[in-house]
Amino acid sequence: MTGPTHRNTGFVRSLRYAPAILIGRGVRVLARWRKPGGGSAIPGVVVNRIAPGFLTTTLNGFPLGLVIVTGSSGKSTTTKMLVAVLRAHGLAVFTNQSTANISQGLTSALLERVSLSGRITGDVAVLEMDEGHGAFIAASLTPRVVALTNVMVDQIDRFHDSEMVAALLAKIAARAADTVVINADDRYLADLGDALEPTVPVARYGVSAEVLAQYPRGLGYAETASTRLPPGTGMQLTRVLGRDADVEFDSVAHSIRLPARGIHYAVDALTALSTAQATLGQHFDPARACAALSAMPAVFGRGEVVTVGGKTIEFVLVQNPSSFQLNVDSLESGTEQILVIIGSDVRDPSYFWPVDTSGLGHVLIASGLKAHDIALQLAYDNVTVDRIEPDVPTALDAFLALPDPASGVKTIIFSADGMRRTRAHLGLVSNAGES
């Protein structure tokens, strides 16, 4: 029989993070008052300092566990796709915004939904996690499933080589209780999976040899595995054409409509489907999963199409050399109105030098803090640049004032800083509504 002392002790324990939660929410109010639309990570910084166990305790408390999506690239799109598939199967899912994928951002996201007892209503948590911060807190997490997207050359000021990234991902993967989902076409991840196999079940996915042959530049990985996934050993992408793709589950082909063009989005979909299968087990329904993916809109800035002042615009976010190259190669042939905005987040313009931009052919305006740098690169690739305008609002106004193109839609290629400035000037909502 449980006595009053035990009940009181349990009640007190359930409220041990209540003071920190209240303080965090107070800080959030002050931060938003001080800087409307900003300061979203500040509450997380404060709570992580005064209650260091809050983040991991809350993340480990979901009935169906925690699913982590991490890797160099594709995390945001894969996470949103996975959430859509799980919700289509009837699960209540807690997830984070793509801008909240480091520890303070994760804590701030939890503060939005957590009760004073430290619980969040939901069946499962699906979190996009930065590979560096994820490795830092991995030892205190017990994820059911960990999905690894790829190893690419990315954020060279933080991750100086691919071996370092692979080692960080291995720390996160080693914490998986049920399954590690691995991209078998990425050599670093294939090796990581082989090393994990005796202790942690590994689910692999990959593209067919025929699909890979369509992309002579490769899929953007630091190193592509020398062999393809054997049929029947994991989900396989067997066809990609524009926004249409075929995925093979247990030797049965299913078609999906992608939210945006490109092999990288098709691989993100494959990652999401394989991770959903690992999470749902026997309850996974391939037809329902593919229908959920096909109904998805483009993820924030990534092939997203918006209408501003009656003008249709496609946004193309480039965050590293691989994503820049894949997006350039995936643009619709004949796109005749292109604005490129490279901002302050690209600290060293040589970062993008490996990209062959010649496929753009003609760019109307180069803009952003690095406007002259990207214009020079374009010129070296024999791309005609009509105008260099570092001021983003001026460039956007001039671009939108042009008549509609005869071929394709107005297309803006931007870095993350360029995306933020573009959305702010055009009065578009931020990604606060993503989840």
Image (cartoon, rainbow, N blue to C red):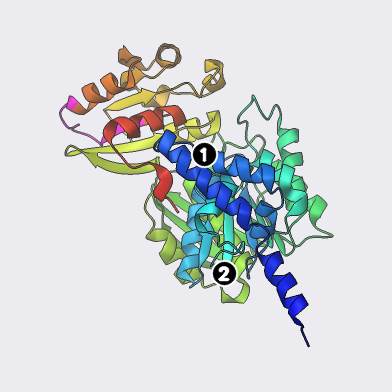
Above or below, 70 relative to 257: above
Q: Using a 10 Å C-alpha cutoff, classify the residue at mark 1 as few (fewer than 14 neighbours), some (14 to 19) or many (20 or more).
A: few
Q: Main secondary structure of the magenta part?
A: loop
Q: Using a 10 Å C-alpha cutoff, classify the residue at mark 2 as few (fewer than 14 neighbours), some (14 to 19) or many (20 or more).
A: some
Residue farthest along the right direction in this orientation? 198
Kindly identify the residue that appears in the image at 48 percent across and 54 percent down. Answer: 80
Q: Which residue is mark 1?
A: 215
- The secondary element bearing badge 1 is classed as loop
Q: Seen in the image, is 188 located left or right of residue 124?
A: right
The residue closer to the viewer here, 212 or 308, is 308
Kindly identify the residue that appears in the image at 32 percent across and 14 percent down. Answer: 389
- The secondary element bearing badge 2 is classed as loop
Above or below, 36 relative to 50: above
| Residue 102 visible | no
Quadrant in the picture for residue 275: bottom right
| Residue 126 visible | yes
> Label 1 amino acid?
Tyr
Kindly identify the residue that appears in the image at 51 percent across and 46 percent down. Answer: 26
Query: Residues in magenta?
Result: 401-412
Q: Position of residue 228 (x, y in %)?
A: 65, 50
The residue closer to the viewer here, 46 or 76, is 46
- Which quarter of the rendering shows the C terminus? bottom left
Q: Which residue is mark 2?
A: 123
Q: Position of residue 269 (x, y in %)?
A: 50, 54
Q: CA distance from mark 1 to mark 2?
A: 39 Å
